[in-house]
Structures are given as C-alpha cells and as structure tokens.
Amino acid sequence: MTSMRNSVQLIGRPGTDPEVKTFENKRTVAHFNLAVNSSYKNADQERVDNTQWFPIVAWDKLAETMGNLVKKGKHVAIEGSLRNRDWMDKNGIRHLTTEILASNFILIDPVRYDTEKG
C-alpha cells in the first residue's frame, strides 16, 4: 500500500474559460469548473445521465498555458490531486472546499487548421 497516492484523472468540458489572475508576487492562478458526464441504467432499465462539476485550480506556468488553450465546452483531460482548503468568511463562518490541483492536462478536441492559409 505504500505506492498509493493522491491522484485524480478526469475528462470533461469546462463550463467557462479559465479565470486567470496574476498576483503582485508574480504567481499566476487559473480557476474553472469541469463538467464530467456519466450515465447508468436505473431499476427500470432507463438510461440516466449524470453531470458532476469539479473545481480545477492550476498555478504558475500551467495556469498561464491553461488560460491560453483551455476553452469553454472543449474536451480536456486533467491530471492532478485532491486538495482540501478552508477559510473563514467575514462573518466568522468556516468554509471547506475540495479542489482538483492540476499538474497536467491534454486537449482532446482536435485542433483545426485552415489549409488555405497554411
């Protein structure tokens, strides 16, 4: 069991283009939500489609690259790890969220080139 680690692989479609921010310390972060579809048959043997949304976070060069290449609705594969993050809001209420910290991605939709323009 020593080879087990925190690893996630998802294939889906972003709900929006990534939101990219650069901080004063020159670090860059990208955020977007990834829709991952699945389906199953219920007790009546009817197909039921299910969509789950996962928050994706990327930092630095990967964030910049995702900001330039990942687009709303385009198929993308994300590799990363789960990260729990908590914070206190202005009313003193603690919030907890689980995110996918991206370490790599692959665009699945084919890139189309205009053969007339080379």
Image (cartoon, helix red, strand yellow):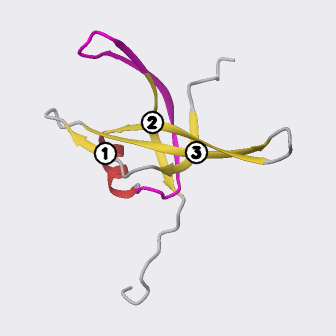
Q: Residue at x 45, y 39 (%)?
A: 103
Residue 82 coordinates in the image, percent (x, y): 50, 27
Q: Amino acid at mark 3?
A: Val
Q: Residue at x 52, y 39 (%)?
A: 53
Residue placed furthest toward the right? 44
Provide the residue span drawn in magenta. 71-96
> Residue 36 bears which disc, if any?
3
Residue 10 coordinates in the image, percent (x, y): 57, 42
* Residue that label 2 marks: 55
The CA distance from mark 2 to mark 3 is 11 Å
Q: Residues within 10 Å of mark 2 (few under 14, many from 20)?
A: some
Looking at the image, which is closer to me, 11 or 92? 92
Q: Residue at x 53, y 56 (%)?
A: 75
Q: Residue at x 58, y 45 (%)?
A: 36
Q: Quadrant of the N terminus?
A: top right
Q: Which mark is first along the chain, 1 or 3?
A: 1
